Image (cartoon, rainbow, N blue to C red):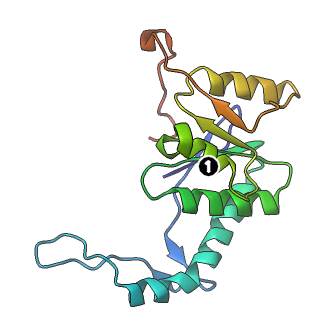
Amino acid sequence: WITLGVSANPVMFEPDWVIGPHKVWKIVPDRDGDGGMKPLTLSELRRWERYAEGFVDSVASAVGERGCRIVGCTTTFEQTTAGVALLNRIKKLSQGTITILGGANCEGEMGRRVAALPSRLDYIFAGESEATFPEFVRTIFAGGRPRDGLILGEPCPDMDALPSPTYREFY
């Protein structure tokens, strides 16, 4: 699942995972003898690589069509490159869209290094953002912009004080 944008009605978008200009290829992982997924070989990865740009374009276009003012990705494990690529393409298609990245890969020194990347990302959220993210959204919707592109969060001392999440978009 990809969560798209910040608006009065956030949108959940489930890509169809059919890629290529004519949507003729589907990614279906091979299974090993035990029912697990077989890892891709380098030659298989290179074969699929030619479809990556078209896939990113199709997802970025779908996001752009929704007209969200803020679009973000979260990154944990190996998702940074994909998130940055997608957000760069969204920004290229819609320069007025504010692009953000956060998650475990933006913590501490990693966040400073991600912020230093030559990318089109507007803001990086480093650390826990239960307080900084809502304040960021209020600032943007009020017509302001934070000065620093790296927004440092702090641990939330009282998780019970946070609003309960809703999952309408998920269901």
> Does residue 31 lie above or below 144 as drawn?
below
Q: Residue furthest right?
A: 143
Q: Which residue lies furthest to the left in this view?
A: 34
Which quadrant of the structure image shows residue 126? top right
At 67% across and 47% down in the image, what residue appears?
A: 115
Q: Is mark 1 on a helix, strand or loop?
A: helix
* x then y, percent, for residue 17: 49, 70
In the picture, measured across the screen, residue 56 lies left or right of residue 77, that is: right
Task: State the image coordinates of residue 89 (x, y, percent, origin top left).
Answer: 72, 64
Could you tell me which residue is drawn at 53 percent across and 31 percent down? 127
Dividing the picture into quadrants, the one containing residue 36 is bottom left
Quarter occupied by residue 68:
top right
Is residue 54 positioned above or below 63 on the image?
Answer: below
Q: What residue type is labelled 1?
A: Arg
Q: Compare residues 79 and 19 and report the one nearer the observer.
A: 79
All told, the count of numbered labels is 1
Horizontal side, residue 127 vs residue 145: left or right? left
**Would residue 106 be seen by someone viewing this image from the given angle?**
no
Q: If the image is split into quadrants, where does the C terminus sit?
A: top left
Residue lying at 57% horizontally and 76% vertically, measured from the top left = 52
> Would residue 14 be visible to someone looking at this image?
yes
Classify 77 as above or below 70: below
User: Residue 59 appears at what percent x and percent y?
Assistant: 63, 64
Is the residue marked by circle 1 packed among few (<14), some (14-19), or many (20+) residues within 10 Å?
few
Q: Name the residue under label 1.
A: 113
Would you place residue 28 above or below residue 109 in this image? below
In the orientation shown, which residue stands out farthest toward the front? 109
